[in-house]
Image: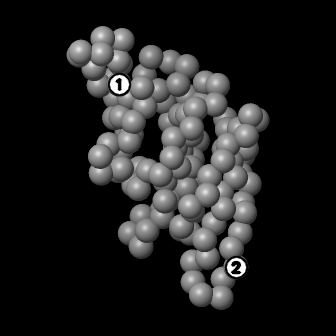
Amino acid sequence: MFVATPDRNSLTVLDISNLSNPIVITRFGAIYSILQISLRGQKLYVHAGSSFEYYGGVYVFDVSKEVPELVGEYHTDLIDPGFYVDGEGVVFLARTPATFGDSSKVAARIVNV
């Protein structure tokens, strides 16, 4: 199972084969403001929002192994409220303007590796 911690600042991977005794397999810290998690095949996409202190973006993990591995990332300094991953691993972000007068955008990034 893949879960964001209660503070949404790290991703935790749990083995829940024994529901009465879940085991933490690994934890990926420094992914601030996790907004969404999406599993597509053997890839896990984690969408993180930006703030004044941290870059957000998308982090891609290969979950085909016992311990998932970070295999790609795309950072942005804009706040990213919209997020979608298609079946080919193309990530679409609907980006909120950083400042007044900046236009909203939809960015498509291939971060699947």
Q: Which residue is the site of mark 2?
A: 103
Q: Position of residue 96 (x, y in %)?
A: 60, 71
> Which image quadrant: the N terminus?
top left
Element carrying mark 2: loop
Residue at 35% x, 18% y is 16
Kind of residue sitting beneath label 2: Ser
Residue at 73% x, 40% y is 86
Count of residue discs: 2
Which image quarter: residue 23?
Answer: top left
Kind of residue sitting beneath label 1: Leu
Q: Position of residue 29 (x, y in %)?
A: 34, 44
* Vertical position of residue 41 compared to residue 31: above or below: above
Residue at 55% x, 28% y is 62
Residue at 57% x, 83% y is 99
Q: Which residue is the site of mark 1?
A: 14
* Vertical position of residue 75 compared to residue 60: above or below: below
